[in-house]
Image (spheres, rainbow, N blue to C red):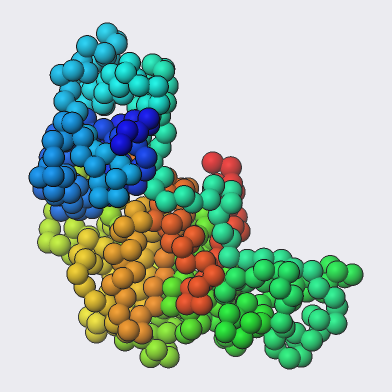
Amino acid sequence: MKFSKKIVVDTNVILFDSSSIQKFHDADVYIPMSVIEEIDRFKKDLGENGRNARQFSRFIDVLREKGKLSEGVYLEDRKTRIHVKADLENEANLPAELNHEKADNRILGTALSLQKQYDDVELITKDINLRIKADVFGVSARDYEGEELPAEDEFYSGRAEITVTSDKIDLFYREKAFVPSPDHKLLGNQYVIMKDESNPNHSAVGRYDLNAQAIVPLITPNDSVWGVHPRNVEQSFALDALLNDDVLFVSLVGKAGTGKTLMALAAGLSKTLDEGRFQKLLVSRPIFPMGKDIGYLPGDVEQKLNPWMQPIFDNVEFLMGADKKAAGRAQELINQGMLNIEPLTYIRGRSIPNQYLIVDEAQNLTPHEIKTIVTRAGANTKVVLTGDRHQIDNPYIDAVNSGLSYCVEKFKGQKLSAHINLTKGERSELAELAANLL
């Protein structure tokens, strides 16, 4: 079987998704020798890159036993053929202005070499600069997206607006439920703003309950939740999801200052300490520096992690109170085992039952890392992801293919999940102005 399409895969694609080469159908997939060498350097890493490098190497070794990789080996479905291509035959095709010692340029050379033999050649890379180089030298190149997700402006917002008659809004207030028309096409746990078609000031808000097939009122505590009151309708939606025991997976996405982390912590403390619904509040975040890394940190594990976890401590202490005793109360909860603040580094292999798990800065996680985290949830555990798609520090992902975006799209409409997109900043007037202007 011959394929007309020829695909060259860059190293960063494999480090992002170790099974990526199996997802190109009806094509010959070429892995340059430079990619094999770069993968070899990553195989001892303890993080996600190392795991993907090792998994890819094992897969290629299985293919090697089935045939000659230099000639191409078919996958089991016969829809893809995998080649490993030596660099020596490609160096002559590299333009003089490109440094032959750079792996990226040799990978581009593979594409240029194939392009002299075949009409349909494409380079797949997550490296923007390599895509630019490819374009300059006439090679078709694109980013690897994995599974098809909506464009950024089409992301699921978690809310909908519907127009109804005045009497139906009155009925909702009386009956505490309203069965919408099938034409509204609401999803499970989607938040709804019902507007009066004749009077814009007459409205109601609720959540579409999939079991009841009706819009139901939001959970509205009589008092504040650890001093936190919702300041806008989006925050009301968020608190409803965070306090709802039937919703076990919540994603909060929004720019800086919209209250994502603070509300999640307040709800977690309320559910753990006040209601006893969960045995422990576990707060975690990935470790990615903003800007230039300052290098190794001194001290034991706890001392090394303090700078990374400090934003969480700041929010907890704010909720505990503004006085000097707040830090002591937070530490007391940690000593009692009611509150754990730790990095995501050690979560693989764990089972986490009866806990309120908050993963902050989730926009920096890959889809596989998100899957690893959510599948750790044991019985009676609630998982909350918070993040801002526009503050990604992971060099291998962007707003479209981050694990946070992936989860929002995959979980939308499920009866155990809810998503809210927060747009209005409430931290301070200055913070909101900066978020909008800078």
The quarter of the picture where the C terminus appears is top right
Image quadrant assignment for residue 351: bottom left
* Spot occupied by residue 401 in the image (x, y as percentages of width and height): 42, 49
Image quadrant assignment for residue 437: top right
Placement of 201 over or under 146, stated as above or below: below
Placement of 231 over or under 437, stated as above or below: below
Q: Looking at the image, which residue is at 21% across and 66% down? A: 348
Horizontal side of 122 relative to 292 (left or right) equals right
Placement of 193 over or under 293, stated as above or below: below
Horizontal side of 414 relative to 192 (left or right) equals left
The foreground one among 189 and 182 is: 182
The foreground one among 399 and 435 is: 399
Q: Looking at the image, which residue is at 30% across and 59% down? A: 369
Q: Could one spot residue 331 in this view of the protein?
A: no
Q: Could one spot residue 25 in this view of the protein?
A: yes
* Spot occupied by residue 193 in the image (x, y as percentages of width and height): 71, 70
Placement of 250 over or under 287, stated as above or below: below
Q: Looking at the image, which residue is at 17% across and 49% down? A: 59
* Spot occupied by residue 422 in the image (x, y as percentages of width and height): 57, 61
